[in-house]
Structure formats: C-alpha cells, structure tokens
Amino acid sequence: MMVMKSWEAAGLLPLSRQNRTTNDNGYGKIMKLVVNGEPHNHRGNRTIASLLDEVGADPKRVAILINDEVISSIKRDVVILSEGDNVEVLTFVGGG
Amino acid sequence: MNTDLSSWFDPEPWLAASERVNKGHVKSAIFSGSPGIKEFAALLTPVAADFLEIMAQHAQALTQHHFGKTISLYIPLYLSNYCPGGCAYCGFASDRQQLRRKLAEDELMTEINALKQKGFEDILLLTGERTEEAGFDYLLKCVSLAAGRFHNVTIESFAMTSDEYRQLANAGCTGITLYQETYDPDVYEKLHRWGPKRDYTFRLEAPARALSAGLRIAGLGILLGLADPVRDAVCLFLHIQYLKKRFWQAGILVSFPRICRQFGGYQPEYPVSERLLAQFIFAFRICLPDVPLVLSTREKPEFRDGIAGIGISRMSVASKTTVGGYSGAPASLIGQFDVSDTRDVETFCDVLRNKGLDPVFKNWDSIFQRQEDTMIFES
Amino acid sequence: MMKHKLKLGDYKFESRLIIGTGKFSDVNTMLKAIQSSGTQLVTVALRRFNRERKSDDLYGPLSKLKHVTLMPNTSGARNAKEAVRAALLGRELSGSPFIKLEIHPNPHHLMPDPIETFEAARILVKENFIVMPYMPADPVLAKRLEDIGCASVMPLGSAIGSGHGLRTHEMLTLIIRDSNIPVIVDAGLRSPSEAAAAMEMGCDAVLVNSAIATTNNPEDMAAAFAMAVRAGRSARMAGIMTESDAAVPTSPLTSFLTKE
C-alpha cells in the first residue's frame, strides 16, 4: 500500500499513467489482492472504502489489516492499496 | 512509602470488636477457612483462653501441614555489645556497666568453626545499635565471612537504609530480624530513653526497606511485657499483612521474645504468662498457617519442649547471648538476656526426636543462592 | 445488598456475571440470553468477515444494547504477537479498552499458554488496554500478571467447554487469597450452582459461555446463572458458617502449661 499523495487526491494522474486504456475508472489495470486468504481482483479506485464496497462489508462494522498492519479508521482515508497486498477484513462474531 | 501509619495499622476497630466476642466467635475463628485480623483478635481474648486445648490441637495440625514434623534449628551469634542506646529493658544499654567488646575477624572465624562443629548451618548475627566500633562496615564484613560458611545468614541489628540492606543482600545475607518491640508510640518513647532507636518510624519502615532492597526474609516480633500485649499483637498482625500484601515473594517470620526479670532490674509493666504466650503462639499459627514461628532459649525447657511442633516451627538451641562465647568468653560479660534453656545440641535434638519431631539444621533452599556452589551451569 | 461493585480499570460493574457469546444457535437467542442475564460485560471474538454469513454480525446488535460493554477476545491467536494484533483490531472496531487475552495454541484441549499470555499482557498494558488474561490456575502466574498491571486474572475452572466445574478449586483458593485484583473464574462452569460455589469461594466474578449457549433454553439458563452469582456473592459477604471439626483430644497437648 502507499499513502496517497495530494495530487492523486486532487484527481490528477501522474504522466506515466495518462495513456492507459482499460475498462476501469482510469486508475490502472485490475489489481490483484489477497483478501481474507483468497485471491481477489480489485476493480475499484484502490481505496479501502471501494474494496469494502466490493466485498459487501459495512466500513463501520469491520476492522482492517493490510500486510499484518492494523489500519486505524483515521488512516483508512489516506491509504491506497498496492498490487499483492494481503488484506484481512475482520468482524466481531460470537466467542467466549 | 506511605508513612501515614494510621492508614495501614489501626488496631482500634479490631480491639473494639473483640470485646463482644463469645464462644461461637472463637470456634468460628479457630476453624475458619480463611482467618484474618478479625479472627486473630478473637483468638487473643479471655474467652478464647478457655479453648486453649482445641487451639493447640488445631495449631499442631496446621504446623504439621505446612512444616511437616520438622523443627528448623538456628544459632544466634552476638558480634558485639557496643551500644549507644538507652533501651530500659536491654542488657546492652549504654548505662549498664560491663565490658564492651566486639569479635575481631580471627575471633569470628573461631566462633564460626566452633558452631559448624556443632552442626549449625543457619546463623543469626546480632549487634547493638550503630557505633563507631561496630557499625555497618563491620557488620557487612562479618556477614560476608559467615555467608561463606553457613547456608543461611540473617542479622538482628540496627535499622538501616535501603542501600545498606542492598549491600547486605549482595554480601549473602538472606534476611533481617527486627522487632518493633512495641507498636505503642508512647511506651516506645518512654522505654527508648536515648539513642538512634528512638526513631520509631525509621524502625517501623525498615522491614519494608529491607524487602524492597532484595533481602528475602523479614522476621518481626513484639517484646511481650512492654505494653498491652493484645494491642501489640494486633498491630504486629496488621504489619505482617501489610508486608505480605506488598511483597508477595517475601518470607515473613514471627518471634515471641518475652521480657523476663532482667539482671539490672527492668520489670515488665504487662507481664505475660506462659499460658498467654501459648495462646498468642496458637493464634498466630491458626491465622498465619504458613509463617514460621520462632522461639529462643529465653524460655524454659519445659515450655519449649511442650510448644515445639504445636505452633512453633523454628528454634535456637544451646545459645549464648554474650559476645562470642561458643569458644570461650570472659566471665565478666553480661548477656543481652538470660538464657533459660541451656541444654546442648545433642540433648535438645534427642528430646525433639522423642516427641516425633525431626531437627533440621539446613535449609536446602539456600544452596541455589551462591554462585560458587553451582556447578551445573557453564558460561 | 450488593454494595460493592466489580472494579475493572476505571469501570465499575453491578453485575458479576460476564457472558461469552460463542456457540449460540443464532444471534437472537444470544441477545435474549444476554438481556436476561443482566450482564454488563460481554466477550466477542474477531473473525474474517464473510458476506454469506452477514447475519452472524454481532457488532450491530450488541452495540445497541445499553449498559453492555464489549470485551473483544483474542481467541484464534496462537502467540503473543498475534494476540496483540487481535487486541488492536478489537479496540479499533469496538472502541472498548477491554481485552480478554486468550492464547491457546493447542486446539484440542484449549489450555492457555502462560508464557505467550504474559508477554502479550505486558505489551497490552503498556498500550493502555484493560487487560483481562485467561490463564492456567497458577498462583504465581497470577501474581506476575498482577505485578505487570493486568486489571484482573481469569483462571480456568476446568477446560473450555468441558463443563467439569471447579476442578482447580485448590489453586483458586490460593490465587484468591493472595490477589489484590479481581479474580474471575473463566471456563468449565456447567451449572448455576457451580457459579454460586465460585462466588462463595471468594471469586469476584465468573465468565460463562458454553453452559448457557448450548442448553435448550439459553434465556432461562442465563437468568438462573445471574441469580446464582448474586446468591453466592451475598453468602460470601454475609459470612458462611464454618465446618467445625473439633476433634476430641486424645491426650491433651497443653498439659505442659502451668495452671493459673
């Protein structure tokens, strides 16, 4: 993962990516991730919010690990996923 | 450390409650699964005195449960009788005319050899209050020398600083014995007429300092006879509870020095009879079942023989309270107190064995303390 | 009258019954049991989100319960590092400072690992968690965990789910005697009478899971446990009658004392 830089946040693309022509929303090709131990093709904008949307999880009800690092809810807005990231999406279940 | 004494030992509520104790309370206290200060205070009452035999039976069972049928034997060695203090009850007080001396290094070694010959492995080194002649450095040196020869070296000496206790621990001392004598501040002030021991609080806090500094054992006690013994015993119990709560790894011991008529004439204001002494011992055993209880040769042979194993688990034998004295001492020396049980080691051990008790000289725990003894671990 | 509350960290609880949420047949049953128990502290586990099992989601329904504080547990962690990670995630998700530290590397008997638990506790205390370590009923380990700042100790009564009751009775007595922090029996309790017995012994609270979740009527069983915990605690505070074993002396031990 990378922390998002301000010009990306503004919607501007770095020069090297300006000529991509794929069927996504312009941020690059499909990104391969591992989510909860399974391979996952991410088609979103590489934010955690879009990944959670893809897997159907409510952001307020899950906790996130990326590559073994706990991602606090404050940090979630600035994290950008990278190819090959290992993501764990966890929720509370019954346990004693 | 919180020096607000009333916050952790105020005997009044327990003394007040014990005035209403009846036979039922006493029985509950004797057989309580988890006796505390309330039960202890109940067992010191005149009502409880009628239950002495039952208390004795229970005390014996508990002593056997926690200590087996053994009696741990130790020997006191007085290093010096120099003392600047004015304690009214003590044979070493500075206004008592007597020859003052201290053991020189070679004399100490002679005494140590004599004691080792008799089979002792557990030694208590004693001095008076701090003096030029026999101060901290002298004591430290003696401790180092003794620690090289005995399995267990403890001291009964003046109240010290944390740093001094730390140095003693490093030199091989395992613990201290330090009696508050009486917890009653007024009586304490009256009896400790002059000298450094007048500082009540410094003395009171010394066992906690010692345990914080790495010493493993604190032996406590009250000098029975100085003040209201029940009051003092309750305070002692609270003191022990405080130390046990603060230092869960520490060993606590309780002794029962009883002031008797002393050469020089101090008369105890609150004389404690043998029956009351026995009641106290049983009360401590029942309420602190795993704490070693210690009795010296100050008491008569008959009493010692009777109480061994029914509460008491640790005793001195063939003691001398003069400086040195185990390999010959000048006859003019006065002991700190008069010894009533003068039997030699073999005789006393035979008596114990006839009672079904096993006299034990060596505490195997202390073997692991000193590095030169360990052969197994290589660097 | 239950004057004294159970104090854990800065929190004070009226109820001395803590409920584990595992093994219930469904979320609704679990919620009913929680409510009828009157509990104010409930443990939950962290698992991977599974969209097919969204109905398992507890966070939603539990966070709606007033007066109930969530206590995430670290079950699933096999060592200190994993437990710490689970704790951070649990706090992240729940906002609760409580963590039930549970590390059992052997999945068969589920006995807690004393060494990993101690290590994790040390780290989590520094991270300002209210640390509640599940541990073997070992009196020395209990003091060590207390020394490093745990808010309580949670010795097992017997193996998780076994229903073998207070097998560790003797060790529990020693732990209770010497502890300056709450002692909460966890694991192995099968019936309300066992919970009452634990409280009579001097435990400060009990944690019950299987004994409620796996019965036919968890809601009623939870209520029964609540009554038992209150009964045991009241009895303890009132002072239980001691068994008198006044043995008849064969030969008197005090004959050596002079009569007065």
Image (spheres, coloured by chain):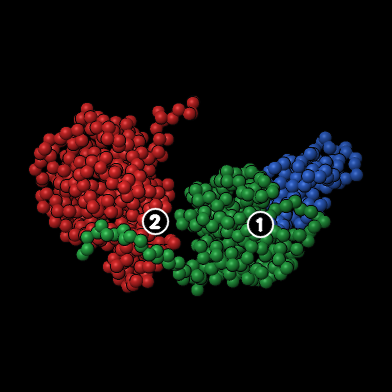
Chain C's colour?
A: green
Camera-side residue: C244 or A53? C244
Residue type, label 1 = Ser
Element at badge 2?
A: helix
Which percent across, then down, holds residue A42? Answer: 83, 45
Image mark 2: chain: B
Q: Is residue B378 left or right of residue C83?
A: left
Which percent across, then down, holds residue B338? Answer: 17, 47
Mark number, residue A73? none
What is the residue that sits farthest to the top in this orientation? B379
When the figure is inspected, residue C185 is found, relative to residue C104, above or below; the finding is: below
Q: Is residue B170 left or right of residue B222?
A: right
Q: Label 1: few (<14), some or many (≥20) within 10 Å? A: some
Mark number, residue B61? 2
| Residue at point 88%, 37% (across, down) | A19
Chain B's colour?
A: red
Q: Is residue C7 left or right of residue C88?
A: left
Chain A's colour?
A: blue
Q: Which residue is mark 1?
A: C162
| Residue C123 visible here | no
